[in-house]
Image: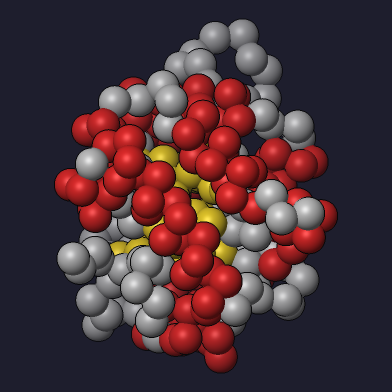
């Protein structure tokens, strides 16, 4: 079954306001004629100006994180309804940097996925093993727990409208990419999990992105794998021409 390719650029904690606007414009211009879904994920404080810069273009906007509650006394946090009203369509949940630097658990990530759906956002549930876990042979155990608990608080209809991003931690920002075969093996495993729990309709509809040192020169091979439906790009998304080259791959 064919799933529309989804390429998202996670800018992480980079850019100033002027950089963010310029990068957004450049991405929109450089990817104008492509038949894939293109998403940029700027820092939270630049969501509104980037949404304004991209108004009327084909590029949609995501956020890097959200709080699990919809509102309240949570100083410094940003909620799903805020993101939706700022022009976001997507939100990352459980990025490995949130899990490993900020201590987010599978349970909290599951609450965030549910919060995203409540706000009408499409969550991109990020999963992936560390190098030690891969070396210990527990990649599937780790990813299974991340996927199952990450989706535990939503129903099958919402699962179908969720994106999963497989980002092996050892490949993020290291220049060390998973081979296309390694990526495909974990993507197929994730789709198999979805098939067991939710059936063919959901399993065949959910898009599974690969992330971790995706660059213009490795994107084509990764994207050609059967269960790889797009990419979540970090470093290379900060250069419009590199990001556009990945979109074209
Ligand atoms: P890099 O592409 O810089 O490895 O980052 C991947 C990532 O974490 C995207 O969310």
In the rendered structure, the answer to whether residue 150 lies left or right of residue 139 reads left
> In which image quadrant can residue 103 be found?
top right
Left/right placement of residue 52 relative to residue 19 reads left
Q: Position of residue 197 (x, y in %)?
A: 33, 35
Q: Residue at x 64, y 43 (%)?
A: 142
Who is closer to the viewer here, 144 or 27? 144
Position of residue 70 relative to residue 89, above or below, is: above
What is the residue that sits farthest to the bottom in this orientation?
Answer: 217
Counting the numbered discs, the total is: 0
Q: Residue 237: give x, y in percent of width and height.
A: 56, 71
Question: Residue at coordinates 37% horizontally, 51% vertically from top-left?
Answer: 192
Residue 46 seen anywhere in this rendered image of the structure: no
Name the residue located 58 percent from the left edge and 24 percent from the top edge: 107
At x 30%, y 46%, the residue is: 195
**Where's the N terminus, which quadrant?**
bottom left
**In x, y percent, where is residue 7?**
41, 67
Q: Between 145 and 220, which is closer to the camera in this rendering?
A: 145
User: From where the camera sits, is residue 198 visible?
Assistant: yes
Quarter of the image with the C terminus is bottom left
**Is 45 rendered above or below residue 103?**
below
Please tell me whether residue 213 is drawn above or below residue 33 in the rendered image. above
Q: Position of residue 245 (x, y in %)?
A: 46, 86
């Amino acid at each position: 079954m064919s799933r529309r390719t989804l390429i998202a650029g996670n800018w992480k904690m980079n850019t100033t306001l002027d950089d963010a606007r310029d990068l957004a414009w450049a991405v929109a211009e450089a990817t104008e004629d492509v038949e894939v879904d293109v998403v940029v994920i700027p820092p939270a404080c630049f969501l509104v100006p980037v949404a304004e810069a991209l108004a009327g273009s084909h590029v949609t906007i995501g956020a890097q994180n959200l709080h699990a509650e919809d509102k309240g006394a949570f100083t410094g946090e940003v909620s799903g309804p805020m993101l939706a009203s700022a022009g976001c369509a997507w939100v990352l949940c459980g990025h490995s940097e949130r899990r490993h630097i900020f201590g987010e658990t599978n349970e909290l990530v599951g609450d965030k996925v549910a919060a995203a759906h409540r706000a009408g956002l499409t969550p991109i549930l990020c999963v992936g093993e560390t190098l030690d876990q891969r070396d210990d042979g527990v990649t599937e155990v780790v990813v299974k727990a991340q996927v199952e608990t990450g989706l535990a608080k939503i129903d099958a209809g919402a699962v179908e409208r969720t994106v999963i991003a497989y980002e092996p931690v050892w490949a993020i920002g290291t220049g060390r990419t998973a081979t296309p075969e390694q990526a495909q093996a974990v993507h197929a495993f994730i789709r198999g999990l979805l098939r067991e729990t939710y059936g063919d309709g959901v399993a065949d509809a959910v898009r599974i992105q690969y992330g971790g040192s995706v660059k213009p020169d490795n994107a084509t091979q990764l994207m050609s794998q059967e269960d790889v439906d797009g990419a979540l790009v970090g470093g290379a998304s900060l250069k419009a021409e590199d990001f556009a080259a990945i979109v074209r791959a």
